[in-house]
Image (cartoon, coloured by chain):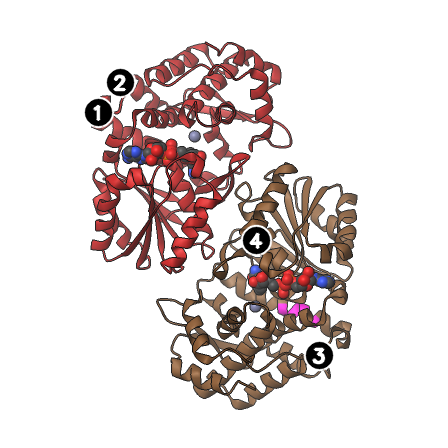
Chain colours: A brown, B red
Amino acid sequence: MHTIRLSLPQQAYDIVIAPGGIAKLGELMSGLNLGKKVLLVSNSTVFQHYGGRAIVSLENAGFEVSSCNLPDGEQYKTLTSVEKLYNTALENRLERSSTMVALGGGVIGDMTGFAAATWLRGINFVQVPTTLLAMVDAAIGGKTGVNHPQGKNLIGAFYQPKLVLIDPQVLQTLPEREFRAGMAEVIKYGVIWDAELFAQMEACDRLDHFQYLSENLLQEILMRSCQAKVDVVSKDEKEAGLRAILNYGHTIGHAVESLTGYRVVNHGEAVAIGMVAAGQLAVNLGLWEQASQDRQLALIQKTGLPTKLPTGIDRDAIVDALQTDKKVKAGKVRFVLPTQMGVVKVTDQVSSQAIYQVLQRMYI
Amino acid sequence: MHTIRLSLPQQAYDIVIAPGGIAKLGELMSGLNLGKKVLLVSNSTVFQHYGGRAIVSLENAGFEVSSCNLPDGEQYKTLTSVEKLYNTALENRLERSSTMVALGGGVIGDMTGFAAATWLRGINFVQVPTTLLAMVDAAIGGKTGVNHPQGKNLIGAFYQPKLVLIDPQVLQTLPEREFRAGMAEVIKYGVIWDAELFAQMEACDRLDHFQYLSENLLQEILMRSCQAKVDVVSKDEKEAGLRAILNYGHTIGHAVESLTGYRVVNHGEAVAIGMVAAGQLAVNLGLWEQASQDRQLALIQKTGLPTKLPTGIDRDAIVDALQTDKKVKAGKVRFVLPTQMGVVKVTDQVSSQAIYQVLQRMYI
Ligand SMILES: NC(=O)c1ccc[n+]([C@@H]2O[C@H](COP(=O)([O-])OP(=O)(O)OC[C@H]3O[C@@H](n4cnc5c(N)ncnc54)[C@H](O)[C@@H]3O)[C@@H](O)[C@H]2O)c1
Ligand SMILES: NC(=O)c1ccc[n+]([C@@H]2O[C@H](COP(=O)([O-])OP(=O)(O)OC[C@H]3O[C@@H](n4cnc5c(N)ncnc54)[C@H](O)[C@@H]3O)[C@@H](O)[C@H]2O)c1
Ligand SMILES: [Zn+2]
Ligand SMILES: [Zn+2]
């Protein structure tokens, strides 16, 4: 069991990485001075595997548990689903001291967090992430929210959980493609923050399937990725500055995702493509060495993630889409560009022409 | 012009009381380091009187203004209205640095605040309250939110404005009944926090119409009421303890409001009734002197507010309704009871029998 503490000006909480940890959920929550009532939020995919174990653990620790499964899929990350949680909270008479527990990937975590943030103006919240992406990214740092019909994550709140419990064993049932999507974020941490993490992954023969990872490497990946996110978030909770570096690969990544209707390419795949593009931009602008970009490319390929743009989206569409992205500040597109392995800078000094040039070479 | 500063651990902002202040809105906002874009939110009742003036002031100060009127009425304080604000925010491409300005009563303020809290996970927010109730209560302290079909203010967030601008002159167009509703909260501050404010109102011959108040008394009422709320909120932003005293008169008040479908009795009237009930409870429990309760009764009557329960609601329904109230903690109903003029205590040691006894004497 490994614990990382995230300390913020107003609160602090633990991120616990514990194989088999779901069976200790109730015990871990007991120490947190929470009310008796817990609403466990999941979807039926995840719930059928881990819901029973979580409920037993909570009940053994004396909690009064109700549960609610939302439909599975990004297309259900909406206010309508959150309203369903409100109704369940009401039916079960949750109080201010009660807790919503998110058991699932980033979709469940984001919605549950937003519901917890806004029900009775904020009740307790615990994250039990079950995808690699949620473990290393979505569950940490307090960003919660839902999509607007016209844009992802436009509605939300900054709201921190009381505990994040990561049980690496649940990754055994995670579809391979979802695993790889999470690996994109892990590679991101290597490039923006932790060159040693990058090197450890480079040293591994195969990374494209979960079963190729040694228990030790998986532990390192989780610990170092969570630590990277914690380091950044604790310095900049509300995304005033530094936190922007977490968007490495996401600027073009988001454009690719949205242009393919969030279906053809998943988030991690889009981020992989976005990192390749950002890396190449950095090389072309003289900020990064080609050798580093080659290392990044090789690692992404080894993980089985794409490095080329999907057919059917053209460059103009991408450059247009960048303009409506949330990360636009005063009309300028902000890029996170690497300068050394483990170090990036944020800039809005990238011309559309430079973007076109890079994208042109990214078709198969 | 009188300024009260509300200082919280994470932020601080001014409450400015300035006759004719709406014409200075833009100027006052200029100093706050906000982005160029402003979305002015109001309803057509208020907008027709003050919308033009607000927009001119904002534009003169260099802001780019768009506006959105929501339908007028508590029944529209819903997620659906907030979604309309999200859509308008999207159409006008509001950015994180942009500002939503609420021009209206508590309904507009609460919804605009919630939309600002949750759009892009939080954009800037300014309150320009136009009812007495919003000036002395709703606009200050950062409680924002909307109603759930089954309960008031169940959905919301704590989210502080960057500025509260109070222009007392706008009260000239406020319907008398709304004015009196605000006076209920002012009397509340007298009883729970500021005996001097209470005495100043007692000294005035008539209080039942806005025109009877001298400019001086109005100024005192606004300053002292805002100061009372600021004192309490700055000691307890998130309602962990002290802030509960602001619910004086609201425990039974809310039950009365909800049982009459929020139509027959308005919020201030319900609070007036609730204060009479709470005062009598305190007397019966030996906490407060009958003489003080008589002073409270007299002041409420002088303001033209009701002191009796409306016909048609029975006591059982009220006691039942208390159980579903948000202020229920671990199944116990929490009451705020006066002990001296200007001092109250919070207790959950009130038996249903004691409540029945008091309510019985409150029918006409
Ligand atoms: N809040 C943040 O800071 C943040 C950061 C990154 C991403 N996100 C959000 O996270 C979401 C993506 O999250 P995600 O990638 O976890 O997707 P997801 O939640 O949709 O999960 C992916 C799929 O895996 C299934 N699944 C989850 N755990 C499983 C398990 N252990 N075994 C078997 N199946 C399992 C899910 O049911 C789903 O079908 C997006 O909405 C994104 O916006 C949020
Ligand atoms: N956030 C908080 O801390 C807090 C505190 C108390 C109450 N509230 C909320 O405030 C709401 C009640 O607010 P309210 O009493 O201001 O009601 P309101 O906003 O409905 O306004 C009352 C009426 O007066 C009209 N009006 C407003 N200003 C006017 C003016 N200057 N001239 C003419 N007409 C005007 C409005 O259009 C409306 O018809 C409730 O929803 C309540 O839950 C919130
Ligand atoms: Zn991501
Ligand atoms: Zn009130």
Residue assigned mark 1: B214
For residue A216, what is the image quadrant? bottom right
Front residue of B231 and A122 = A122
Q: Is residue A223 magenta?
A: yes
- Which residue is found at the position 73% from the left and 82% from the top? A206
How far apart marks 2 and 3 lie (CA) works out to 80 Å
* Up-down relation of residue A2 to residue A300 (above or below): above
Whether residues under marks 2 and 1 lie with C-beta atoms below 8 angstroms apart, the answer is yes
Residue assigned mark 4: A160
Q: Is residue B328 left or right of residue A214?
A: left
- Which residue is found at the position 25% from the left and 49% from the top? B55
User: Do discs 2 and 1 share a chain?
Assistant: yes
* Up-down relation of residue A63 to residue B183 (above or below): below
Residue assigned mark 2: B204
Where residue A209 sits: x, y (%)?
A: 73, 76
How far apart marks 4 and 3 lie (CA) works out to 32 Å
Magenta residues (range): A220-225
Quadrant of image for the N terminus of chain B:
top left
Callout 2 amino acid: Cys
Front residue of A195 and B157 = B157
